Image (cartoon, helix red, strand yellow):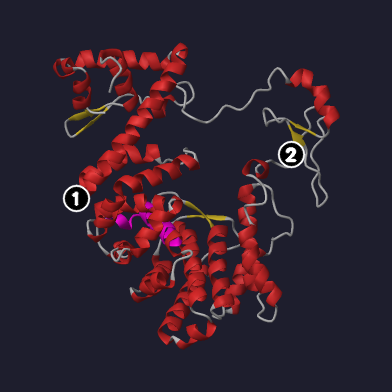
Amino acid sequence: MYDSDLAKILPEWANWSKSKRDKVFKEYQTFCFSRANENEFNELARQASILERDRFLKLVPLKLDARDSFGLQQLMDESWNDLDGDDKEEEDRKALAKDVWATAGTSIVNALDLRDSLIAMNLIELIEANCRYNSRALRKLRKSPKFIPWLKFILEADKRSEDFCGVVPIQYDVFALMKFVIIACSKRFLNDLLQHDIHKLMFFKVRRCCPSLLAVLGEAIEALVKATSDYYPHQAFQADEALNISFQVGNRMLCDRCLEFDLTKERFRGHTGVEIWTDVGEIGGAFANALLGMQLFLRIPTPMNVRRHLGKFGASYTEREPRDPLERKRWSNRYFCKRVEEFDFSDPRGQIEGREIKMTLGIKDQYVEDSRKSSIQCGQCQAVEPEGDEAIFFSKCSRCKLMYYCSRDCQQKHWKIHKKSCKKPAKASLPTPLLNLQETVHAGYDRVEGHTIYPSVFGVWFCHKYGGGAL
């Protein structure tokens, strides 16, 4: 919230000295730190969040229509991460994506013909969120004749010097966007992608992109292979010589890049100036999925030395699926590396299993149950939850969801002790000042290009205290 916004609430604010403004801001910080004002602060934070969201939805189409690249960048820096951050619930992020499309969808489509890298960088984030959560927006973008040329523009960003779209975080969003765009696309859209050589650009990225991007790029290539096999059966694919050669070259690039990594290790340190650790298993699993798809659907074989190399990571695969979600993802990567090494065209049942197992991963149990560790103990007798194929999971307290028991008798005996601390888990709504003060209150205010920017919660508090409570 700027000085001009506060002056609209209280005209005298513009004539106040800096010391008097700082005194008011310190009064606001004292209010935030007070435990007695916690409920009132949460209500102000809720109002500030709504105010910030409405302001963002109102300004995005205005900035896009005016081609104001710097204004759009400043707006995204101020609001987007707070509205669409990783700490937000998926339902909130889905609702935000639909609201953005409802208010700025036409402006987003019209801005696709711009070749301004600063606007394109922010469009990537908006479009990626809509393609992830809003199927209506995805269909509209696929039908736009401007969309595929725009995709080609951002994929070629690393060839242009000083292009903002070529930085690693933005390229990561680009590859994630490509995956959502290609999955379940129509034949017309796929043909347009192939005519604009999007598949060649994606294969070319394998050879030169940062290692931290290879996993998500491999997933995008896997989606491309699956879509191509759906609309180009084996005979039609073999008949199209140019398409066949381009995918064979892509297969060779995947194989060459795969051999660069030591798949006997879990992670490796990047060679850049910044210390970046990359999960080798994610790269191996993504490449194994893409190569296995080429073998299954397009009949492009994987060389024996690459199959053996992937088998190094799949050697420790076990039949029992881990319960921890992170370990289960690594387990599935090992499975596909093993499948590439042991692939046999004469085994149709193995081919079907290789296609279907990935669709079942991640939907067997809920996240809370998957994250339970193997060292779970009974709250009464301290017995450890057994492991093995015939293991019986301990039941947990239905109220607090934290304490586990091996039997109903143990739960009844332990209730006299447990009832003192048994509480329903609080809903993760707005952060309280004691739990997350820095994110909501901020240590102070910022100065940008002669303007003073205050936290939005301060604006709501100031309105209630000096402006009669009406914004």
* Residue 433 location (% of width, % of height): 44, 21
Q: Of tags 2 and 1, which is closer to the observer?
A: 1
* Residue 38 location (% of width, % of height): 46, 17
Specify the segment rendered in magenta. Answer: 164-179
| Quadrant location of the N terminus in the rendered image | top left
User: Is residue 176 on the magenta stretch?
Assistant: yes
Residue at far right of view? 409
SS assignment at label 2 = loop
Residue at the spot 49% in from the left edge and 24% down from the top edge: 435
Please state if 254 lies on the left or on the right of 118 as rendered.
right
User: Is residue 256 on the magenta stretch?
Assistant: no
How crowded pointer 1 is (Cα within 10 Å; few <14, some 14-19, many 20+) is rated as: some
Where does label 1 land, which residue?
67
* Residue 441 location (% of width, % of height): 37, 24
* Residue 118 location (% of width, % of height): 25, 52
Relative to 2, say whether 57 is above or below: below
How crowded pointer 2 is (Cα within 10 Å; few <14, some 14-19, many 20+) is rated as: few
Where does label 2 land, which residue?
375
Relative to 115, say whether 407 is above or below: above
Which picture quadrant has residue 318?
bottom right
Which picture quadrant has residue 159?
bottom left
Answer with mark 2 or mark 1, whichever residue precedes in sequence.
1
Please state if 432 lies on the left or on the right of 374 as rendered.
left
Q: Amino acid at mark 1?
A: Arg
Residue at far left of view? 15
Which picture quadrant has residue 373?
top right
Q: Main secondary structure of the magenta part?
A: helix
Please state if 165 lies on the left or on the right of 353 as rendered.
left
Q: Amino acid at mark 2?
A: Ser
Residue at the spot 29% in from the left edge and 35% down from the top edge: 55
Please state if 449 lies on the left or on the right of 79 as rendered.
left
**Does the image show residue 342?**
no
